[in-house]
Image (cartoon, helix red, strand yellow):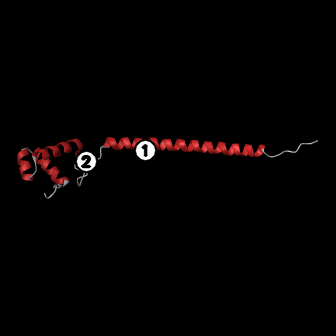
Amino acid sequence: MGAGRRKFTKEFKEEAVRRLGLGVSLTEVARACEINPNVLHRWRRELQEYGGKAFAGNGQCRVDESRVAELERKVGRQALEIDFLRRCLQHVEEQRRLQALNTRGSSIPTSKKK
């Protein structure tokens, strides 16, 4: 079995990409860092796309911001629905109480005067 995947620090990745920016060839940097040139391409693209948020640590995938926003909207909608349903339930309970009071009040026998 292999030794597993190597892990590189954020600083290591940024330094490798910085060296590309200084004019060192991709092949030279890849060879010096002992990584595949395709990996170096990916690091450079991630750094350009995400800037300081690139390389989000310990192999964790960066959470897609649009997915987070979508889930926050969904939670907001559900909170509104819950609030609406609570108010509906309150209204129904009040109606039942009123109906019970009216029913109880009308069932009291009244004496008729002769």
- The location of residue 106, given as percent across then percent down, is 78, 43
Q: Please state which of residues 22 and 26 is positioned toward the viewer in this rendering.
A: 26
Image quarter of the C terminus: top right
Which residue is drawn at the image coordinates 53% and 41% (left, top)?
84
Which residue is drawn at the image coordinates 20% and 44% (left, top)?
46
Please indicate whether residue 53 sits to the left or right of residue 97 in the image: left
Residue 59 seen from this side: yes
Which residue is drawn at the image coordinates 6% and 52% (left, top)?
32
Please indicate whether residue 70 sits to the left or right of residue 89 in the image: left
Vertical placement of 2 versus 50: above or below? below
Please indicate whether residue 24 sits to the left or right of residue 65 in the image: left
Q: Which residue is mark 2?
A: 53
Q: Secondary structure at mark 1?
A: helix
The amino acid beneath tag 2 is: Lys
- The location of residue 53, given as percent across then percent down, is 25, 47
Q: Secondary structure at mark 2?
A: helix
The amino acid beneath tag 1 is: Val
Q: Which residue is mark 1?
A: 75
Mark closer to the chain start, 2 or 1: 2
Q: Please state which of residues 24 and 110 is positioned toward the viewer in this rendering.
A: 110
Label 1 neighbour load within 10 Å: few <14, some 14-19, many 20+: few
Label 2 neighbour load within 10 Å: few <14, some 14-19, many 20+: few
Label count reads: 2
Q: CA distance from mark 2 to mark 1?
A: 25 Å
